Amino acid sequence: MLLTNADLDHALGLFSLREGGRLNIFAPRAVREVLTRSIGLDKVLDTFCGADWHEPPTRFAPLDAEDKGGLSYRMIPLAGKAPPFAKKISPRGTHSVAYQFLDRRTGGVLLVAPDVCAVNKGLRDALKNSDAILFDGTFWSGDELKGLKSTARTAGEMGHVTIRDVSLELLRKSPARRKIYIHINNTNPVLAADSPERAAVEDAGIVVGWDDLEFEI
């Protein structure tokens, strides 16, 4: 399991895996510290299956040390803060990352970036040299949630760039063969097949992801 941050909806599934075999969890040190100190993830897992934690590298390295011809991976540190439930213990370090995967047999490169609050140089470079991109499509606009609840936080306050203002043009310019939005909130109008927002995304050569979507690189 590779964690991109310590948000509950990214990590709670690990509790459901506690009755299986020993887990291999890949996450930056700050993410691991938040999950172990604030919600006791390590204590629960150690009571059941146990877990081995791995600090992801920033340069490509084998995902499985025993698999000499398979996948390599690396993390791309991003801006980001600890989740709200961990503000009192927020450790220093990297709280949000993207991952890039290299298939050493085909040379194909996949970028997975489901939670992006700002676009830095490392992410821009990865967008230029990936064959396929899974990107943060959480919100179309910054004030999307305020239409439902006036006190709701903006996309920026929740740690997400928007499609309309940032990622649409960013992905349009990427040379990747496959560009796919994931992590889409149910308020996002791109989910409606006949919406102008969906048309804008498709005109840019970007796909709105769906369950069971498969592709090859």
Image: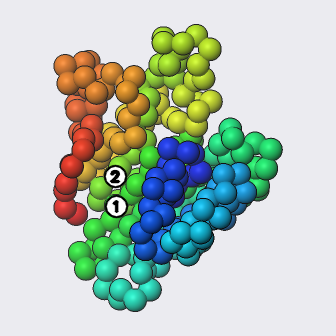
Horizontal side of residue 143 vs 42, given as left or right: left
**Secondary structure of residue under mark 1:** strand
Q: Residue at x 71, y 51 (%)?
A: 38
Q: Is residue 206 left or right of residue 5?
A: left
- Amino acid type of disc 2? Ile
**Around disc 2, counting alpha carbons within 10 Å, would you say few (fewer than 14), some (14 to 19), or many (20 or more)?**
many
Which kind of residue does numbered mark 1 sit on?
Leu
Residue 153 found in image quarter: top right
Where is mark 1, residue-wise? 110
Disc 1 vs disc 2: Cβ atoms closer than 8 Å?
Answer: yes
Distance in Å between CA atoms under marks 1 and 2: 6 Å
| Coordinates of residue 185 in the picture (x, y in percent) | 41, 31
Residue 150 appears in the rendering: yes
| Mark 1 crowdedness (10 Å alpha carbons): few <14, some 14-19, many ≥20 | many
* Residue 192 in the image: above or below residue 201: above
Is residue 41 left or right of 37 when viewed as pictured?
A: left
Q: Residue at x 30, y 73 (%)?
A: 103
- Quickly name the residue at label 2: 133
| For residue 54, side relative to residue 99 (left or right) | right
First in sequence: mark 1 vs mark 2: 1
Give the x, y percent position of residue 104. Answer: 31, 79
Which quadrant does the N terminus fall into?
A: bottom left
- Residue at the far right in the pictured view: 88
